[in-house]
Image (cartoon, helix red, strand yellow):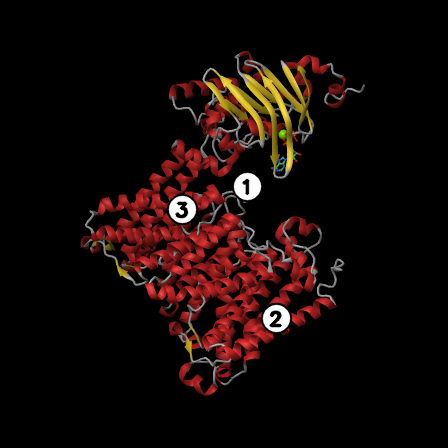
Amino acid sequence: MSKTVPDETPLPIRGFAAAALVAAAAAAAVWLAQASLSDYVVTLLAVLFLNAALAVSLNFTNGFTGLFSLGHPAFMTIGAYVAAILTFPERRKGTMLPGLPEFLATTELSLLPAILIAGAVAAVVALIVGFPVLRLRGHYLAVATLGLIVIIQSLATNWDTITRGGSGLSGIPRLTGIWWAFGFMLVVIAAAWRIKFSSLGRAMMATRENELAAECVGIDTVRVRMLAFVLGAFFAAVAGALLVHLISVVTPRTYSVLLAFNLVVMVVIGGSGSIIGAVIAASAITVLSEALRPVEESVGLYGMSQVIVALALILVLYLRPQGLFGSGEPMIVRRLFGGDRFGQTP
Amino acid sequence: MLEVRGLDVFRGATHVLKDVSFNVARGELAALIGANGAGKSTTLLTLSGLLRPRSGLAVMRTEGGEIDLTRASAERIVRAGLIHCPEGRQIFQSLTVAENLAMGAYTRSRREEIAAATAEVHELFPILKERASLPAGSLSGGEQMMLAIGRALLASPKLLLLDEPSLGLAPKVVETIFDVIARLKAQGVTILLIEQNAVMALEIADRAYVMENGRIVLAGAGRELMDNDRVRQSYLGVPL
Amino acid sequence: MSQYLFQQLVNGLSLGSLYALVAIGFSMIYGIVRLINFAHGDLVMIGAFSTLAMIAVGVPWPLILVFVLMIGAVAGMLIESVVFRPIRGAPQVTGFIATLAVSIVIQNSALLLLTGQQRNFVFPAFMRQRVPLGGVSASLTDMVIICLTLLLIAILFFIVYRTRLGTAMRATAENLMAARLMGVSVNRTILAAFAIGSALAAVAGVFWGGKFGQIDPLLGFVPGLKAFVACVIGGVGSLGGAMLGGYILGLAEVLFVGLLPQELSGYRDAFVFLLLIVILLVKPSGLFVRHVEDRA
Ligand SMILES: Nc1ncnc2c1ncn2[C@@H]1O[C@H](COP(=O)(O)OP(=O)(O)OP(=O)(O)O)[C@@H](O)[C@H]1O
Ligand SMILES: [Mg+2]
């Protein structure tokens, strides 16, 4: 029944219909969950959706393009502060952030424009930083992006007039809910899917596999890497912005290197480049560390779950370095939504 | 001295050596010739323990005993006296010439012996003495080849594997190299030589093997093979 | 020279000594296995905390230094043989992720054992005196750090450039296959590189504690990253470069804090990475001594 899908139409009609159906079913499930489960579980679900979105967005660089970036927390921090300052109620800005410049002190945006601006700011930063940094191979890039986290954190700590320093911003309006998180996750997944199975996606993977060969067939690898990095940064910033509007505080340490590590774990365990893999791994790890939390608290062994996650990663590297799905997608999902076997490791 | 039976070697998914068998007797110079990609270098890498065969047998017998080359570590194989002078010279460019020679003697510990062996190599290739304290990367191609051979000699080989020692060298240098090979043979070193330059190799070889697509397809005395039609056509460039 | 300038110079050199010690080991390990070892900085922490433990049980200082060297070496060898050896030959990124994971394991195990609280770390009282040096004076702690570092670096260079082991290490770093054909045991050579590099990092931990007076389980992160920056400044894979890079970084950092207005001193770490990015921008490859990045 399934003919090979032409490359030019990554999401054929059947794909759209299937996608709409699955999204609707998932939305129904979310609605049910929201109606019947405790606030705690609903919030946890929202966090899970955001983590899945983050893991998928890290795939633009670390999965599709083979750029090992650890910069997500930096972009998330940027997004969080920018959006928080924009949505903060005007009347409380005077006490919270007395030093704010006039045009910021008098703005109060709603969530959607705020997160879009947050994403755009991070994208511009990524563009500027990417220019020198993306020329680097492998681990140079990794360390440079870690350096970016340090830079952004120290900006957030020291630029008191805008950020309120180390104590951070609290009382951020709780504008995000499970629906925002869910919707955002769908957007990221759809974007990643479309890109992966488009000519841009193929260019990304060609860049990953063999840069020289990619350039020989006319791919502008510099542009491709930059696109991947900027896209990842944009989504990371939006996710960072959404999350602080859920937990209503942000400090310079809200998004740390540890988070970068955990996102990498999700991508690696899911299979670098696999969208569904990243979603599954992100969900599993979020649930697992949440489940371990009471255990940690009862025995007083804080940090234990993190040790377990890291050891699990090392085990995966030994036993199944390609992760759950390699860089491909599970077959049923491809059947449903379209997309060729491209990127599937043999 | 060297016995190889039914060797099968894979590189990645490629079946490179297929049921390869041959012998090299003590004191003998054996040549292994064949087209590019036939599997000659792969054979040597397997003998020196850098590649592991999927099946088959490879043993070296010396006065010191018998060593199973398919199992022993590369380090033990070197200590047993099987020395591999690899394709493309592979000298340590950032180390000095003297340090390269010292690396050749890595498995030996008696200082006087090493000094004597170094002196011998210096006599064989005087240029190496002149350039002793220069980085090896600054040597010319021919000098680098001499260094690679000198380095192998410092390990005091009982069985010396030479992988295309004449590759890319000027005729004069090739002559020097072949002179040295003849001298080593006269000294009683057993040698397995891989050569593109089939004429020269067959001339000095006691015994020769021809490899095609990972199989030994012909074997015989060096002179004998030179008269073989198939060899003449494929490797000596003589039309039928 | 004014006392203030001299003070800054000594301060920069002693900070640079710390970076140099960490960077040299980092560079050594990178040179031989082409692996950015993320867990390298955590050995600084391990060195600092083992010192604290030894002070508590009353081990005399000279012995502490010896033991810390040994502890660092053993820890480095353990990490290499348990985690890195099984994945040797895997793609670079795999190795990098594994070192990241090791770092997380070490840090969080330390948090489990020691909690996240800051602990006081004190050198013996006499170390806090000042040494007069013709008109100016410097703290004894800084002087000791500078001198001991130079001594350790001298020993290291002797090992690397004058001994059989060192020659084998350099040979293996350059051409693994050829080294094996010489009969070099690659496992043992790599183990030695990890042992030596890690020992130096652990000693840097002692100095770190003594210089800053407080330690915590996460203190290794920043020196680990800065070691990388030092390596980039001096040329990745070169030991002399790593050492120079360490000193340059230490001096630059002190200069930054000393010369710029007080409000900016909080940006000290940011400055270091900005420097990294600028170097990469201006001379993206020119600073690297070794150009051949990939080894088959
Ligand atoms: N690292 C490798 N991985 C997979 N296959 C390899 C590898 N190295 C060599 N091969 C394959 O093994 C076969 C034999 O190669 P080998 O180097 O032994 O040939 P050779 O006879 O020495 O050729 P030449 O005369 O060119 O040196 C070739 O087909 C080659 O493509
Ligand atoms: Mg060959």
Viewed as shown, does residue C180 lie left or right of B23? left
Q: CA distance from mark 1 to mark 3?
A: 23 Å
Position of residue A83 in the picture relative to residue C1 (left or right): right
Query: What is the number of the mark on residue C295?
Result: 1
Give the residue type that dot 2 points to. Answer: Val
Whether residue B135 is visible to the viewer of this picture, yes or no, is no
Q: Quadrant of ligand 1?
A: top right
Compared to A156, does C273 lie above or below? above
Q: Residues within 10 Å of mark 3 (few under 14, many from 20)?
A: some
Instruction: Answer yes or no: are tags 2 and 1 on the same subunit.
Output: no
Residue at the right extreme, as displayed:
B240
Residue C103 placed where, x, y %?
A: 41, 54
Give the quadrant of the C terminus of chain B: top right
Q: Are marks 2 and 1 in contact (CB under 8 Å)?
A: no
Picture quadrant where residue B27 is located: top right
- Secondary structure category for the residue under label 3: helix
On the picture, is B168 further left or further right than A88?
right
Residue under numbered circle 2: A187
Name the residue that disc number 3 marks.
Answer: C79
Spatial CA distance of label 2 from label 1 is 41 Å
From this view, report whether residue C294 is shown above or below residue B165. below
Q: Residues at marks 1 and 3, common chain? A: yes
